Image (spheres, rainbow, N blue to C red):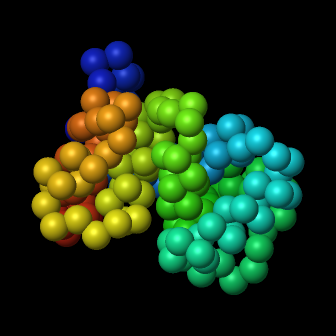
Amino acid sequence: MCKRPDAPDNASSRPFYARVLAGNSKLVGHWLMLGQADPDRLAMILADTARIAKLGEPESTPDGATLTHWSGDARPPRWAARTALFLLVQMPAKPLPRDEDEACAWAYCWLHNRDFEAFETARDSLPEHLRDRLSAPLAEAWQDFRGLRLV
């Protein structure tokens, strides 16, 4: 259940999608932390990339304060989390999710950013540095993606 042996037990006791929602803010925060520009510029890059890469259609381009808010307790729009993953995966530094909630968000966004016919294709298309780290979260994301989530 999206859990490493060193992760706290309370992380896996929450439903998968709840962990994704909690991890989306962390995912956007990761982009804010690693992006090499001021928050206003990073927000513009995020929105422009979402439009160009067809990861979402932001109604407007957020400002840096909004991006910072999304990286805290606020829930970012889905396009922002999907685009943050898209950008993070391309970074030469090869960042990794920092905790289990963020790993669940990475896996969820990975499946929603591309069209995969099978779980194995989704897993094998992950950048090599992410395969071990996202193995369990990706399996849960796949189950959720295929509509097996219990509400």
Quadrant for the N terminus in the image: top left
Q: Which residue lies furthest to the top in this view?
A: 6
For the C terminus, the quadrant is: bottom left
Does 131 sit above or below residue 7?
A: below
Q: Looking at this view, is 88 or 151 the one in front? A: 88
The residue nearer to you, when weighing 70 against 64, is: 64
Q: How many labels does the image show?
A: 0
Residue 47, horizontal then vertical, whole percent: 68, 69
Where residue 133 sits, quadrant-wise, is top left
Q: Where is residue 53 in the image (x, y as percent from the top left)?
A: 53, 71
Residue 94 position, x and y percent, is 51, 33
Residue at position x 82%, y 46% in the image: 37
**Residue for point 18% across, 55% down:** 121
As drawn, is 62 to the left or to the right of 138?
right
Q: In which quarter of the image is residue 104?
A: top left
Residue 99 visible in the snapshot: yes
- Is residue 18 shown to the viewer in this render? no
What residue is shown at x 83% (from left), y 64% (from top)? 63
Q: Nearer the viewer, residue 13 or 96?
A: 96
Q: In this view, does 25 lie above or below 134?
A: below
Percent of width and height locating residue 31: 65, 46
Residue at the (24%, 54%) spot, across then down: 122
51 vs 115, left or right, is right
Does 148 sit left or right of 31 as displayed? left
